[in-house]
Every structure is written in structure tokens, then in C-alpha cells.
């Protein structure tokens, strides 16, 4: 089939189409579109539920963000293109909840305790412990200079003692630790110090946030050119390169693999004469992409991504991950919903939540969500949502629509 390039324009009956509509079509995560016309709706009453027939699906081969153009696998024979609602995040969140319910690991005990009634959950009453107490407990010299601080060396700087307290608590917690603070209070520095201390203990860290910017900020600090510790960090950034800041694109997984493959092939090819091990490794890298992929993923000590994007990690995606991460760090945790947190939480043994509870809470556009999932509902459910009783409580109507839509999607109805 010949490929066809098309330009996205506003429909005649929708002259003020918002820019986010075009962004949705042009997003890297959008893999296909569906053909339709204005009369191709199910139901005699012309409801907003569209039919997504696979015979009318067209794959997106490429896209041009500047010209709003898509390269499709074939020329569409209908005047309209539709996007099927993306329920991927909802499915993954439900899968995490079911996995925690049906097949938890021993390390997940603290996560299960979060679900228990306060009458049954037993949390130790830990006092607030400051840095001098940690020196005594750890049999370390009380002189701050004796502790191998990486970034928090200047004890005279305001706030350093609190950052140090947090790092010690996080390193020693058996389950959870929290850091609260407004913007500019040094949370990112504390995160970087914690990560460097964990790396020094030969630990592996999973760093997540709800936004790409928050994740990239930490990588930028760790891998700054003037950082004396950057050689100790092997970061792998999981996510589409279009969503990453320029300063971290070199650590994006696919690009990182490509760069390392070229470097290793060049080095091994220059060995004269090569050892048997070098010959075997060169052949494996050239003939099997999985060899290099596994080498990089197993050697990476900081794996980064958004709470949902991290699922693109090859071992996580293929459910072939042998070992849990030693610690999960969630930055901007106040923006992360609990079910969203559970997705990466199941991949770790301990959990550190960092953020500002006074910042904006997670934003959910109920009306947009309802519109997106209504296309997945059978007509009786849509009709029920329009009942007088439902109209009296619109916020409960939206939640009911979403819940029933999730059930229908997961059950394949």
C-alpha cells in the first residue's frame, strides 16, 4: 500500500478547534487513526459513541509537528480521522492493583499495610532523629567531615542540616520516607545526594515523577559536566525522545544503546590480536541486540522515567525483570495519584516520596475523561448517565461513567 501524507485541519463545523486536539494526533504515543464521516455514528439518536472498526484503522508512519502533517500507511477514503481513547494508563493502574492483591512479593508487605484498616496496620512509632544521633548509632565520628558527603559538604549553608537528616532517614528506613518543602528549598539537591549515597552502596535506584521535567531536572544535576561524581552514575532515561529535554537525550535508552554499541564495536575491532572473550563479545553485540540491551540495563544504577512511561523499560515491559530496585524515589509526589504511584512502586523494595503538599494536586479533567471513555460504553450505560437522577449529581455521574467504562474495557466488552 502506498504511504500518504495528510494535513490536519479544523472541521468546517468546528472552526475553533483547540491546539491540544492536534497535539493528540501528533503525539509519539499515537500509533494509528480511524477513518470516519459525520454520519458514521452508532445509534438512531446520534450519540457520541463512535465505532472503531479495525478495517478503518490506518497506521501512522511519521509526523511533522511544524506543518501538522501525518504520514499514513494508505490514503484515507473518509473525510474525518478519529483517535481511539487511550486507556493504557488506566489498564496499567488496574493491573498493579490486581497484582498487589493477587500475587504480592514479600517486599510488598509495607504497600499492603497501606491498604489495611488502622485497627490492623502496625507502624512503628519512630521519633524524629537528627544527624548527631545517626553518628552515634552508626559508630561514626561526630565530626561532619568524616561522613562521605557528596554534595552536602557545606554545613554552614542554611538548610544543609535538614537535608542531611533526610538523607540519613531515607538510607535507613525499612519502608517509607518523606521530604516536604516548597520550591527552592533544596529538594533536588537532597535527591541527588541520596542517589549518590545509594550508588556508593552499590544500590540500584528507580527515579519517577508524574512529569518529564521533574525527572530530567535530577538527571541534569547528576550528570552536569562540572560534577565530580558523574562518572559514578550510569543513568538510563526511559521515554520518547520528543518528551525529553535536550540535556538528557544522550541518556535516552534507545540512543544510549546505539551510542554504546558503536563505541564497543570500535574498541573491540581495534584490539590486535583480540582475546577469545573479546571476539565472542564483538560477535554477540553485532548479531544480537539483546546482548547489549541486557548489559546496559543490568549495569544502569539509576533508571528514570515517568510513573507510566517507566513501563517501556524492556525488562519491565516483557515481565522479565529478575530483581527489584533497591529504592523508588518519587519526585513531585503531591501531583501523583495513589493508583499511579502503585505502578512503579511494585518494582522496588523501599519508597521515598518527595514534594510540596501545598502545590497543585493531581489534575483530572472530569468532563474530558467522561467524553473519552463514553465511546467505550454500551448504549444502555450512556442512556443511564443521562437520567434525571444522574444529572442532579454530575460529579458522581462522571465517576460512575469512568468506573463502568474501565470495567467494560478490561473485560473486553
Image (cartoon, rainbow, N blue to C red):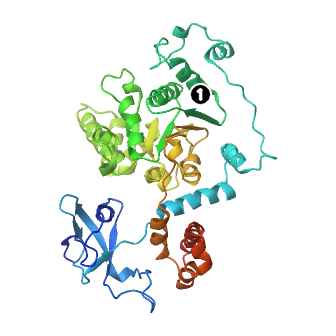
Badge 1 marks a residue whose secondary structure is helix
Is residue 338 positioned above or below 70 on the image?
A: above
Q: Residue furthest front?
A: 392
Q: Position of residue 55 (x, y in %)?
A: 35, 83
Q: Quadrant of residue 95?
A: bottom right
Q: Nearer the viewer, residue 186 or 98?
A: 186
Q: Quadrant of residue 400?
A: bottom right
Q: Position of residue 247 (x, y in %)?
A: 29, 37
Count every numbered label the image shows and give the total. 1
Quadrant position of the N terminus in the picture: bottom left
Is residue 170 positioned above or below 133 on the image?
A: below
Image point 75% across, 38% down: which residue?
123
Q: Quadrant of residue 229?
A: top left
Is residue 239 positioned above or below 126 on the image?
A: below
Q: Is residue 309 left or right of residue 113?
A: left
Is residue 113 positioned above or below 396 on the image?
A: above
Q: Nearer the viewer, residue 142 or 162?
A: 162
Mark 1 neighbour density, 10 Å: few (under 14) some (14–19) many (20 or more): some
Q: Nearer the viewer, residue 100 or 11?
A: 11
Q: Residue furthest right?
A: 119
Image point 61% across, 38% down: which residue?
350
Quadrant position of the C terminus in the picture: bottom right
Image point 22% across, 68% down: which residue?
71
Q: What residue is disc 1 on?
A: 171
Q: Position of residue 270 (x, y in %)?
A: 23, 33
Q: Position of residue 13 (x, y in %)?
A: 27, 79
Q: Is residue 135 left or right of residue 255?
A: right
Image point 37% across, 44% down: which residue?
292
Amino acid at each position: 500500500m502506498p504511504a500518504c501524507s495528510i494535513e490536519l485541519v479544523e472541521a468546517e463545523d468546528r472552526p475553533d478547534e483547540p491546539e491540544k486536539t492536534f497535539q493528540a494526533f501528533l503525539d509519539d504515543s499515537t500509533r494509528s487513526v480511524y477513518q470516519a464521516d459525520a454520519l458514521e455514528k452508532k445509534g438512531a439518536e446520534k450519540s457520541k459513541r463512535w465505532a472503531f472498526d479495525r478495517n478503518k484503522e490506518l497506521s501512522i508512519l511519521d509526523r511533522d509537528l511544524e506543518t501538522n502533517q501525518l504520514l499514513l500507511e494508505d490514503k484515507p477514503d473518509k473525510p474525518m480521522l478519529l483517535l481511539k481513547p487511550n486507556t493504557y494508563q488506566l489498564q496499567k493502574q488496574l493491573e498493579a492493583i490486581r497484582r498487589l492483591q493477587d500475587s504480592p512479593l514479600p517486599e510488598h508487605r509495607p504497600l499492603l499495610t497501606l491498604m489495611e484498616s488502622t485497627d490492623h496496620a502496625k507502624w512503628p512509632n519512630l521519633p524524629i532523629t537528627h544527624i548527631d544521633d545517626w553518628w552515634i548509632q552508626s559508630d561514626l565520628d561526630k565530626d561532619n567531615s568524616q561522613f562521605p558527603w557528596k554534595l552536602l559538604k557545606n554545613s554552614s549553608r542554611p538548610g544543609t542540616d535538614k537535608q542531611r537528616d533526610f538523607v540519613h532517614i531515607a538510607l535507613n528506613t525499612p519502608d517509607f520516607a518523606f521530604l516536604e518543602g516548597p520550591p527552592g528549598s533544596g529538594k533536588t539537591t537532597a535527591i541527588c545526594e541520596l542517589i549518590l549515597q545509594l550508588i556508593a552502596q552499590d544500590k540500584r535506584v528507580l527515579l519517577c515523577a508524574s512529569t518529564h521535567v521533574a525527572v530530567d531536572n535530577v538527571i541534569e544535576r547528576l550528570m552536569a559536566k562540572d560534577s565530580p561524581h558523574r562518572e559514578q552514575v550510569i543513568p538510563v532515561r526511559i521515554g520518547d525522545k520528543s518528551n525529553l529535554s535536550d540535556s538528557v537525550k544522550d541518556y535516552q535508552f534507545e540512543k544510549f544503546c546505539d551510542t554504546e554499541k558503536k563505541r564497543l564495536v570500535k574498541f573491540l575491532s581495534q584490539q590486535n590480536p583480540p582475546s577469545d572473550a573479546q571476539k565472542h563479545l564483538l560477535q554477540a553485540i553485532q548479531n544480537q541486540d539483546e546482548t547489549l540491551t541486557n548489559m546496559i540495563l543490568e549495569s544502569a544504577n539509576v533508571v528514570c522515567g515517568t510513573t507510566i512511561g517507566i513501563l517501556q523499560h524492556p525488562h519491565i515491559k516483557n515481565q522479565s525483570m529478575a530483581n527489584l530496585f533497591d529504592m523508588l524515589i518519587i519526585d513531585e509526589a503531591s501531583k501523583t495519584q495513589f493508583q499511579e504511584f502503585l505502578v512503579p512502586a511494585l518494582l522496588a523494595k523501599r519508597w521515598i516520596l518527595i514534594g510540596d503538599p501545598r502545590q497543585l494536586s493531581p489534575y483530572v479533567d472530569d468532563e474530558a475523561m467522561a467524553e473519552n471513555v463514553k465511546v467505550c460504553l454500551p448504549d444502555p450505560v450512556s442512556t443511564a448517565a443521562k437520567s434525571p437522577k444522574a444529572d442532579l449529581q454530575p460529579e458522581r455521574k462522571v465517576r460512575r461513567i469512568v468506573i463502568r467504562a474501565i470495567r467494560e474495557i478490561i473485560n473486553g466488552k
